[in-house]
């Protein structure tokens, strides 16, 4: 899957000092050709040192993702508009470069900044496109004079875990694979978890005398719940009314058209599951993850992944089932993999940020502990050539 990579090194290299940390970080912008779209990427590395350095490529999760992996909530608003929840790839790159590593991160194809995208073209992309783009970044990183191509590590978060695992399985030059909250089970099962194990209990907690009403939806959307829990409301609201700023229940579920959804008859777990299944059909908003379109989950890559593996998992993850990390670890061990490590963080969520519950998981800033754990794991393996 080699492809021509065009890079344009930025003229200016900026040095950023962090008073609480021991070493400055150098930043360098460059561009990578993603099928005719020049994506902005950035490499960070220890300032004042020659290198080349062992390098980590950060491969992002789903959605409109910029190089900082900025997450903006569609449900939480402040005086300036939608609230930015985190920018965790920026935090990871700074933290790991402080520990002596070069770190490369990038805007997804058609993304030009936080929540800035050519939406018409972006939503026609497939996981195969994102895989080709990730490999283009890997090739650009290897060509960079600050990168030691013999000590190249891939870091994939969520959706990005499937891309990183695929590259690790197909390439012989990957020194290690880091999987943050990986997609272990089939895609449909993963999204069903979000709706049935996170969203369904969340909706039930706002029921009024056995019904979901516009009022109960309003209370749910203004609660302290996270994005995944609140996204369950998208299945039970009338989309036409929603886009005009009004709240009404989904008329397709409201059999007697009384403006309420009766739990157990009009609104059931099986009805929600049918909506999830429909989203995987051609034209559905999850069609890119259908078996004929998507990449295999990480659980299907176990036998093909040879380099050392680090799995990072929050115990209050609303996006992927936390139990998947343990299943993945056991599968690697059963397959005889010689170097697999699991780090479970019971009180953290999908972003490895704080979460008081699965329902409350909301892409908060990554905690310091996981960054330090990644740095220690990398240091122990950076001297090992693949």
Image (cartoon, rainbow, N blue to C red):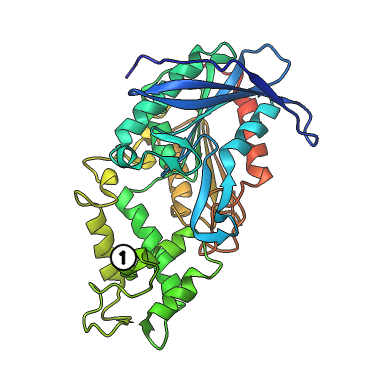
Q: Nearer the viewer, residue 278 or 9?
A: 9
Image x and y of residue 174, in percent: 47, 22
Up-down relation of residue 164 to residue 76 (above or below): above
Point out the residue furthest to the bottom here: 209
Callout 1 secondary element:
helix
Image x and y of residue 355, in percent: 59, 59
User: Label 1: which residue?
Assistant: 239
Q: Which residue is located at x 36 percent, y 35 percent?
A: 301
Q: Which residue is located at x 38 percent, y 71 percent?
A: 246
Residue 200 quadrant: bottom left
Point out the residue furthest to the left here: 282
Image x and y of residue 248, in percent: 34, 75
Image x and y of residue 261, in percent: 31, 80
Q: Nearer the viewer, residue 210 or 380?
A: 210
Up-down relation of residue 7 to residue 117 (above or below): above
The N terminus sits in image quarter:
top left
Q: Which residue is located at x 40 percent, y 59 percent?
A: 194
Q: Which residue is located at x 65 percent, y 32 percent?
A: 94
**Number of numbered discs present?**
1
Residue 275 quadrant: bottom left
């Amino acid at each position: 899957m080699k492809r021509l990579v065009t890079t344009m090194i930025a003229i200016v290299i900026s040095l950023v000092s962090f008073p609480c940390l021991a070493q400055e970080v150098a930043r360098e912008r460059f561009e990578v050709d993603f099928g005719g779209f020049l994506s902005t990427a950035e490499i960070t590395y220890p300032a004042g040192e020659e290198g080349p350095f062992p390098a980590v490529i950060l491969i992002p999760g789903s959605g409109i993702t910029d190089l900082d992996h900025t997450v903006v909530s569609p449900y939480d608003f402040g005086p300036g508009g939608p609230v930015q929840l985190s920018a965790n790839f920026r935090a990871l790159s700074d933290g790991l470069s402080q520990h002596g590593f070069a770190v490369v991160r990038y805007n997804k194809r058609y993304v030009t900044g936080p929540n800035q995208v050519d939406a018409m073209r972006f939503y026609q992309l497939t996981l195969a496109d994102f895989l080709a783009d990730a490999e283009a970044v890997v090739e650009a990183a290897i060509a960079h004079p600050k990168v030691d191509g013999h000590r190249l590590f891939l870091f994939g978060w969520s959706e990005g875990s499937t891309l990183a695992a695929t590259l690790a399985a197909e390439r012989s030059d990957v020194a290690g694979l880091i999987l943050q909250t990986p997609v272990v089970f089939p895609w449909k099962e993963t999204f069903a978890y979000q709706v049935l194990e996170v969203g369904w209990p969340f909706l039930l907690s706002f029921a009024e005398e056995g019904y979901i009403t516009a009022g109960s939806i309003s209370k749910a959307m203004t609660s302290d719940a996270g994005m995944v829990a609140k996204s369950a409301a998208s299945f039970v609201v009338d989309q036409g009314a929603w886009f005009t700023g009004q709240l009404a229940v989904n008329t397709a579920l409201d059999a007697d058209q009384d403006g309420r959804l009766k739990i157990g008859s009009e609104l059931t777990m099986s009805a929600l599951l049918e909506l999830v299944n429909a989203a995987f059909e051609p034209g559905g908003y999850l069609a890119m993850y259908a078996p004929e379109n998507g990449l295999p989950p990480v659980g299907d890559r176990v036998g093909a992944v040879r380099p050392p593996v680090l799995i990072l998992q929050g115990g209050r993850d609303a996006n992927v089932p936390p139990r998947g990390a343990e299943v993945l670890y056991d599968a690697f061990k059963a397959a005889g993999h010689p170097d697999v490590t699991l780090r479970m963080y019971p009180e953290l969520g999908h972003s490895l940020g704080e979460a008081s519950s699965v329902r409350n998981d909301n892409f908060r800033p990554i905690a310091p502990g996981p960054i330090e754990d990644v740095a220690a794991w990398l240091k122990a393996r950076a001297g090992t050539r693949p």
